[in-house]
Amino acid sequence: MEFIPEWQVLNSLAVGEMANGNAIGAAEYMRQAIRIAGNTRSLQETKATMQNYLASIYISAGLIEEAEDILREAIPFARAQRFLVLGDDLLMLAEIEQRRGNRAGAFTCATEALKIFQARGHSYGCEQAKQLIKSGLGV
């Protein structure tokens, strides 16, 4: 029998809870997975990806403040490590800023995300960022 790390089991449970429409249960599992993976050096990019997923869980549950908190915690680390998930984090934060009417903040986040996606050749991310920018964020 193959050993499956606890963080990975919790991550899978979170995905399952989201598939069943239970965002609150998914968020709890994901928070636990992040806590467990958090101090393991080899899992730092995985942790950043899980933080991104947690933010999307919060957004789907209408918990915008919680989503913003996790993104603002994740972004400096993802930026320092140059993780691709930084572009996704910035794009979600841009959408949050747009909802709040902070066009300047949304535009800054979206254009930084676009630059990251362009540098990495991430065409889907580029298109998402361009659509957000074209949706009226121009300052």
Image (cartoon, helix red, strand yellow):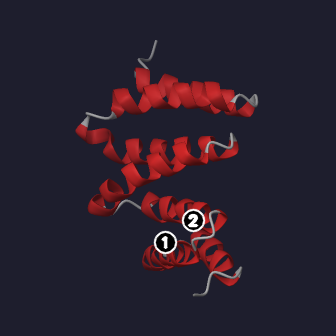
- The residue sitting at 57% across, 31% down in the picture is 27
Q: How many marks?
A: 2
In the displayed structure image, the side of residue 44 where residue 58 appears, left or right: right
Find the distance from the CA under tag 2 to the CA under tag 1: 9 Å
Q: Where's residue 89, x and y in %?
A: 49, 58
Categorize mark 2 by other alpha carbons within 10 Å: few (<14), some (14-19), many (20+).
Answer: some
Tag of residue 109: 1
**Residue with the mark numbered 2:** 97
- The residue sitting at 31% across, 54% down in the picture is 77
Amino acid type of disc 2?
Answer: Glu
Q: Where's residue 21, x and y in %?
A: 76, 31
- The residue sitting at 62% across, 24% down in the picture is 25
The front one of 125 and 51 is 51
Q: Are marks 2 and 1 in contact (CB under 8 Å)?
A: yes
Q: Where's residue 26, x and y in %?
A: 61, 29
The front one of 37 and 57 is 57
Indicate the quadrant where residue 81 lies: bottom left
